[in-house]
Amino acid sequence: MATLRGLRRVQYVGAEHGGGMTGEGGQTLRHANPPGLPARWRTVPYERTVLGVIHNVTSATRLMDLLSVFDGDPRVQVFFTCVGSSPFAHGIEEFAGAREFALIPWSEARAQDFDLAVSTSRGGDLQEISAPLIGSPHGAGYNKKLSREPGAGSREPGAGSREPGAFGLTAEWLVHDGDVIPSAIVLSHEEQLERLRSGCPEAVPFAHVIGDPCADQIRASAPFREDYRASLGIHPGQKLILATSTWGGRSLLGTDLHFLRRVLAELPRDEYRVIAAVHPNAWYGHGGRQIRSWLEPFVREGLILPRPESDTWKAAICAADAFLGDHGSLTLYAASSGLPGMLASFDDDCVAAGSPMARLGRLLPRVLPYRPLRPQIEHVMRHQAGDTRLAGAAGLVASHPGEALGRMRTLCYEHLKLAEPSRPVTAFPVALPLTVPAPRRPPAAPPVFVDTHCTAGDRPAVRFRRYPAALQDEPGPHLRDPHVVVEEGEPERRWANVADIVVARRTTEPGRLFARHLGCGIVAVPAAGDTCTLFLRDGRAYTARWHRLAWWAGPAVAASVLYAWLAEDGGDGDSAGIMVGSGTGESLLSLRRTGQPAGGLPDLDAAQAAVEAEG
């Protein structure tokens, strides 16, 4: 596909060539017959044309939500254009191409007459569109301050120099040459009317409070929480933490890219999963490859990182147990859905006074940097549900629950002068499966620090917690006395050299691993079924068998349990049935000392000599 710069100089080719567009370099861009062509070229004889105005991928995702009100109506043909007003234009072509938009260049869109236009941003020269214009927010209402820079499409001389109100609710964004640009201004809650009256009183007669289609879809998706959790790979008993980041230097990622490292480092990996919802402007502003590159160490340790143009963030709100957010719309959507959460960052300077976001910014607790993170998260999960002040602020996100698409359709069809379709319009749950890219899985699991707590007695019990070793800056208070577990072939010598436990391949001789890992005390060798053999450096061996198998049960955990049990028991135990818990459930592990296995242990001196000979 041609570049956006090229799209603005596209020329139509004749209908005999299929109604394509030829851009720079002779590339042809296919789309539906443009609105200016005679009706005889149409397959479906539509009666009205609607123009969807794209500013960036963020606005395009909301535009798709709103334009779904025309689904199933052959009387309406929807075209799309990019107004070229956003510095975050990267990704629009791919987004539009993947969804097969009937995309026409902005220069052509300005020259054509449409029956209706819908825009989810206020940027660009929208006054040049020849159609009634419906203006809608592209997020959770109107919560940010933004001022036009002089010379960048300013409505009047000196625009951008005064203190701005809420983006989309002031004359700076709504008025051109004394006239209100939109024919209809969509609001999601009645509270926005007062702010509109303050920022642009002449626009109040054009305002329509319809609610919020995203909030409605999240509400419709809530009953399917377990389906979304399963699609995201969340195991029973695990808690899912949603980290949300808007764009800009004061966002969660902008303030501290390594905040996600802290989250993953401090939360036990078997008890918690983390999903990061990154704003499209951040993703496409830097490039998806770059964002993935910066976050690759975290993805390797289990971070779920969906592409931002998908609906996965909506499903994640339904699936999550808590959120860590900033001043972006996802924080509002999460809070309005009743999800407990905290603020990891917040930019007071860009949040509009009196907005729901400003209120939540005062009420939501902040993540404390010098205190362990897990107790903070667990505290809000226990105590935030009954907070009436938070519920009141979150309730300002949307009026008319469940009615946004119906009200939007009525508004659109009134402007189109068409009777509404008889079928009801419904907010459907987020579809499955989710578009979550599976990270490339290395053949060896990453090294972990394992904390254990053993209770001795007639019925011993071991509770374990595993943490990603590579993400620990230094042992913090969340780690008490951990041991290190690696798998055979661990590439980083800093972990291989200090490993207390090494998990072998099935055919590996344990003696060679003891020789390669001089600090190793236990080698775990998988066996058939739910069993493994655990070799100790002093020559002892144990057969471990799992009963009531949990998803996390395996040779690595069995070795950690033996490590803890022997330390507690003084090293003299021969057999035991041990209840093992991870915080997500329990499983029974039986340990039985087998003495010297068939064939005997390899000679460690000989193994050491062989390893040294191999270099």
Image (cartoon, grey):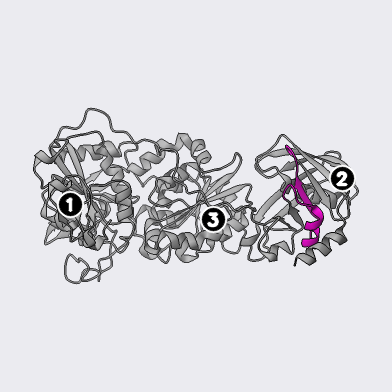
Q: In the figure, is residue 312 to the left or right of 584?
A: left
Residue 513, magenta (yes or no): yes
What residue do we see at 10% from left, 49% from top? 113
Mark 1–mark 2 distance (CA, rounded to whole Å): 82 Å
Query: Which circle's residue, 1 or 3, is located before the other in the chain?
Result: 1
What residue do we see at 26% from left, 58% from top? 2
- Magenta span: 505-530
**Residue ID for mark 3:** 299
Disc nearest the viewer among 1 and 2: 2
**Residue ID for mark 2:** 597
Q: Element type at marker 1?
A: loop
Q: In the figure, is residue 128 to the left or right of 522?
A: left
What residue do we see at 41% from left, 63% from top? 347
Residue 519, magenta (yes or no): yes
The answer to the question of whether label 1 and label 2 lie on touching residues, with beta carbons closer than 8 A, is no
Residue 475, x across and y down, in percent = 68, 63
Q: Quadrant of the N terminus?
A: bottom left
Dot label at residue 57:
none
